[in-house]
Structures are given as structure tokens and as C-alpha cells.
Amino acid sequence: MLSVGINLPVGGYLPQSLVDFPGYIAAVVFTSACNFRCPFCHNPELVDPEKMKRNRHIPFDEVLRRLLRNRSLLDGVVITGGEPAMHDALPDALRCLKRHGFLVKLDTNGSYPEMLEMLLQERLVDSVALDIKAPFRSKRYEEIIGIPCSEAMMKRIERSCSLLLNSGIDVVFRSTLLKGIHASEDVEEMAAAAGNRLVLQRFRPERTLRPLAAGAFSDRELQALASRFNCLICSSG
């Protein structure tokens, strides 16, 4: 029986996706827990401590068995969350996936630059998507992520962006836009921080961590912002 002894807390698994790793067929592994509390988060069972208690963890050994069983149908694996980079077991999990020949895409909020730097140095990721929540000002970020945000935290996220911009790997910077919270000048600042590689994501109000007074931009409004600030629009949003 396959056993690798990796204690990555997996809260969800999608056996196949055609949109989460553009250009590849990938399984999606959702890790539990996050250091942010973004009210618009659409995976509340991975973030809310009470919901996490009721959401059974899937052992990484079981995830690996599923992946290997479908190996011929997959190009890679997306590790998302929650926030995967907060878990010490992440490098071992990615080493395991790379040994089995999987391409790896990581989704992160950028608040763990030391982990990100290690993964990049060991070439354990082939693609990274970093979510930029707001312009890089602590008070502005705090309004979006639902927890206090210090200047030190902003420096950490900025460092992660810099690491990725200089990494040479496939990188996407994403921002979920909330009507009534994000303004056009916010998009301009976020696009600049992303080296003009920002992808705008549509807010999905039907399933969130907690209720919030915000709406979704229309397709026309998103397209206008994307055109004005040289952004793309997430096709799966």
C-alpha cells in the first residue's frame, strides 16, 4: 500500500480540470486553512475554522493514489487553497509530485515569500498564480483581506511579487474585483504592481465566507477596465 508520510492537510480534490492550469489537463488539490479572511472567498469550508472541523481531510497518500491512478489522463497538478504556502509539508508534497513527473501550479496570496523562494530555487513549481487583493497599502489591503495588515506584511507580499517577476517561470497575477470596494485607480495600481500582467477575476457573490456589501462588475465594465489598464480577464470566472 502506497505511503509517503506527508502531512499536507488536503480539504478537497478535483480529479480533472481544463481551466485551472491553462494549457494543461490537471487535477486540483485544495489545502485547508488560510491566514487571510477575505469575505468574498468562495472556498469558506477551507478557511472558516468551524467549517473546517466538519470538512474531512483527505490524506495525502490517498490523493497520490488517485493521481497515479489517473496519471495517463493528467499533465499536472494545481495546489490551491486555502493558502498552501503556510504549510511546512508543502515542499515534500511537491517533491513527491515532481518525482512522479507532474507539472505543478501553485496558487498563493503571496504572504509567505520564504516558502515561495525555496520552491522556486528547487524548481518545484512550473507555474504560480498570485492573488493581489488591493493596491499595496496596508490600510487598503486590510479592508479586503479581513485581518489587520501591517507594513511588514505588505513588504512580504511585494517581495513575493518581485520573486515571481524575476523567476523566469509562468506567472499570473490575479485580482478579484468587488464593485463598491475596488475603484478604477485601484486596478491601475494593481496592474502596475503586477508588471502589467494582471488578470481580472469576476466576483461570485453566490458563495462567500461572509456576507458583504459588494457586487460584481458586469462583463462590459470588466472589459472596459481590462482595456484601459492593459489587463486580461479570467476566462473561467
Image (cartoon, rainbow, N blue to C red):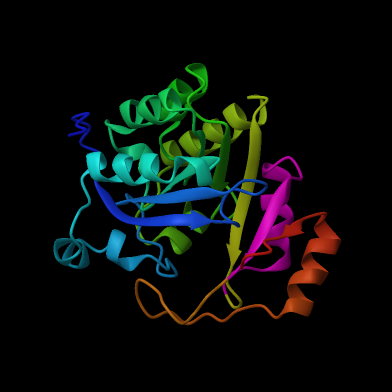
Q: Nearer the viewer, residue 41 or 61?
A: 61
* Residue 214 magenta-highlighted: no
Relative to 218, say whether 168 is above or below. above
Residue at position x 20%, y 63% from top? 55
Q: Position of residue 136 (x, y in %)?
A: 57, 47
Q: Position of residue 159 (x, y in %)?
A: 53, 31
Residue at position x 46%, y 63% from top? 143
* Residue 189 magenta-highlighted: yes
Residue at position x 76%, y 45% from top? 196
Q: Position of residue 75 (x, y in %)?
A: 55, 40
Q: Nearer the viewer, residue 210 or 136?
A: 210
Residue numbers of the magenta segment: 181-202
Q: Nearer the viewer, residue 118 or 188?
A: 118
The quadrant the N terminus occupies is top left
Residue at position x 77%, y 55% from top? 231
In the visual, does 119 lie left or right of 198? left
The quadrant the C terminus occupies is bottom right
